[in-house]
Image (spheres, coloured by chain):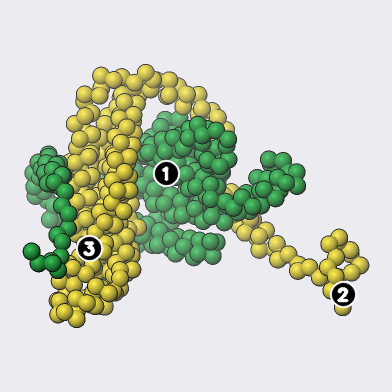
Amino acid sequence: MSTQIKLGSDPSQPSLRPKPPGRLKLYMTAVLILALIWGSGKQTEASLGELFTGMPNMADLLKQMFPPRWSYFDNIVRGMLETIRMALVGTTIGAIIAIPVALLCAGNLAPNRWLYYPSRLLLNLVRTIPDLLLAAIFVSVFGLGPVPGILALTVFSVALISKLTYELLETVDRGPLEALTAAGGNYFQRIAYGVVPQIQANFMSFVLYTFEINVRAAAVLGLVGAGGIGLYYEATLGFLEYDKTCVIILFTLAVVLLIDYASTKLREKLL
Amino acid sequence: MNPIMIPKPKRSSSRWLIYAALLAVYVWAFSGIPFTGIKETAGQVVESIVTGLFAPDWDFVYLPEGEDLLRGLLDTLAISILGTVISAAVSIPFAFWAAANMSRFRPISGSGRVLLSFVRTFPELVMALLFIKAVGPGSFAGVLALGIHSVGMLGKLFAEEVENIDRGPSEALMASGANRLQLLWFAVLPQVLPSFLSYTLYRFEINVRSATILGFIGAGGIGTPLIFALSTRHWDRVGIILLGIVVMITIIDLISGAVRKKLV
């Protein structure tokens, strides 16, 4: 047997180099993905032609949006403040509820294994429901206004913060907990002195992160009647006042970017 | 003074100022919310919702004449697949634009970054409203909205991936005289492709969630029958649609999570 490896391709001699893995799987995957895309295109009636014929409409729309009518700004400041309020209140209540929920869902701290699995399952199911959908349901229960929006944001915050927190809780250092148990601390003392100091900075960071997401969400909750600046989209688009819509969009972008920036800086300081 | 006394942790004097500011913010936030109490019918509505959710309208799952749950979910799925594919394709050039190690001048990558964060902050529902004005109501508007909005996040994640590549292969290719396109194809792409796919799948999970609500404003999918059932108070129908959405999203998350684990 020859130990020499031939680099040139010689069809008469069997190559000692390992054969590249079969490409059949790759081709099949490609075909499957193409079929999926084609099927999706068919289902959604997507057509490039429609997009191109729609382009002038789009350009027309953009032309009508500029220049923005800045005088409308005074009308929407209240809506914007309400949006921020909703996000703030929803995130805070959600964060408070998330603490016991996260403790229930953390495998190493759960007081009872029989509570652990159902609460995790419930949390996973709640997380699949988008916040706007929650808001739409709450609107039909509580009527129009910011209250259903706050409730939707609260539920969403509980689901998100709990998830992030229980994953963190499962990685806490057990040393302080064991020391506290040895010294005779009860469950609440162990949590308060053994766990809280370890996770509080990260927890605050999660809350701020959720707040960022909630501000973005709250900006569109008004579309289903749940308060905030989103209400004004319907009003202005319905009357074809695109220059006013433009003011809303720009204002929302500015506020969201500002809050994101502040929150990111704060989170960097925390950790 | 006791020598083994434990020093007190330092407390900065600005701490109380921060607490006061926080308190003021919360007073402002809570005082502005009109807790006017809930509608008198709320209890009744909650009761009918609960009964509706636990006794869903199974007939709605498949209706021969159309506009049923399965077709709505299929539509939602199609919107999110197509939207994700479009955004992944559009994101690749943007990622190379925004990656700091791909251009010689800082302002080029910086401008790409700013553009991406602008797209990211633009709410997808508002984008869908604008596309509805352009191409008319329907699933296609939803596809375009998702396709453009997702570029904001995917482009950023892709760009970070491009920034973290190993320079070895590209230097080797450059030394053997490869041009820029060959460099991209043989050194950069093989390194970033698995994570690109993984991020795309992750974004697909998010897009499925978004696609369920696009119908609220007329951009296709399961949201249209849902908002209709909500406004006409067909709670059993709301129940079955919610159930369908939760089941679909859970299954997709499981599949996508398994594939992503294999990819990276």
Asked whether B122 or B11 is in front, the reply is B11
Q: Which residue is mark 3?
A: A197
Q: Which mark is residue B220?
A: 1
Q: CA distance from mark 3 to mark 2?
A: 66 Å
Q: On the same chain: label 1 and label 3?
A: no
Q: Earlier in the sequence, mark 3 or mark 2?
A: 2
Q: Secondary structure at mark 3?
A: helix
Residue A53 lies, in percent from the top left, at 54, 28
In the displayed structure, would residue B200 be above or below residue B111? Answer: below
Residue at 30% across / 36% down in the picture?
Answer: A258
For residue B132, say whether it is visible.
Answer: no
User: In the figure, is residue A101 to the left or right of B162?
Assistant: left
Residue type at numbered disc 1 = Gly
Q: Secondary structure at mark 2?
A: loop
In which quadrant of the rendered view does residue B63 lie? Answer: bottom left
Residue B194 lies, in percent from the top left, at 57, 56
Q: Chain A hue?
A: yellow
Residue at 53% across / 55% down in the picture?
Answer: B195
In the displayed structure, would residue A8 be above or below residue B138? Answer: below
Give the letter of the chain under mark 1.
B
Q: Secondary structure at mark 1?
A: loop
Dot 1 surroundings within 10 Å: few (below 14), some, or many (20 or more)? many
Residue type at numbered disc 2 = Ser
Q: Which mark is residue A2?
A: 2
User: In the figure, is residue B224 to the left or right of A53?
Assistant: left
